[in-house]
Image (cartoon, rainbow, N blue to C red):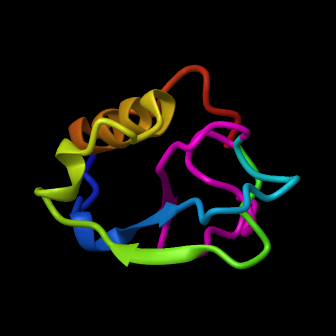
């Protein structure tokens, strides 16, 4: 079975603005989002399953940004699992 191609370019980072959205994370966390929409997935959710803010601040993801201490621990764990080619057992998709 071929291993899926993995790249940081497949993900984006969203940062909360000064006004936390009612539908987004209630903490000032930085979340990761798949850049490419998946047919079976939700287009309006972060990797950890949280809803996106109404007007998210998007950033390209790079190795330097992965060091940010504000990144949601669940989003980071899912990204690391995908990097290894695993599907996290807690992920519904």
Residue depicted at 63% across the width and 62% down the height: 18
Name the residue: 43% across, 28% down.
Answer: 73
Return the x and y of residue 76 as percentages of the image width and height: 37, 37
Q: Is residue 23 left or right of residue 82?
A: right
Instruction: Tell me if residue 12 comes above or below residue 51 in the rendering.
Output: below
User: Residue 21 colored magenta?
Assistant: no
Magenta residue span: 26-49
Q: Quadrant of residue 49?
A: top right
Rendered residue at 48%/77% (across/down): 58
Can you say whether 69 is above or below 35 in the image? above
| Residue at the image point whose x is 18% and y is 43% from the top | 67
Q: Position of residue 4 (x, y in %)?
A: 28, 56
Residue furthest to the left: 64
Rendered location of residue 72, percent (x, y): 47, 36
Q: Is residue 8 above or below residue 1?
A: below
Compared to residue 81, the image places residue 55 above or below, namely below
The answer to whether 60 appears left or right of 64 in the picture is right
Along the viewing direction, whichever of 64 and 93 lies nearer the viewer: 64
Residue 12: x %, y % from top left: 41, 69
On the image, which quarter does residue 41 sit in?
bottom right
Of the pair 9 and 21, the residue shown nearer to us:
21
């Amino acid at each position: 079975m071929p291993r899926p191609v993995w790249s940081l370019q497949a993900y984006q980072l969203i940062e909360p603005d000064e006004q936390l959205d009612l539908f987004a994370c209630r903490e000032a966390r930085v979340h990761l989002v798949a850049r490419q929409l998946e047919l079976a997935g939700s287009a309006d959710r972060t990797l950890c399953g949280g809803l996106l803010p109404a007007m998210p601040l998007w950033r390209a993801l790079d190795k330097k940004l992965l060091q940010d201490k504000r990144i949601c621990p669940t989003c980071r764990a899912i990204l690391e699992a995908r990097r290894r080619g695993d599907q996290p057992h807690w992920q519904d998709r």
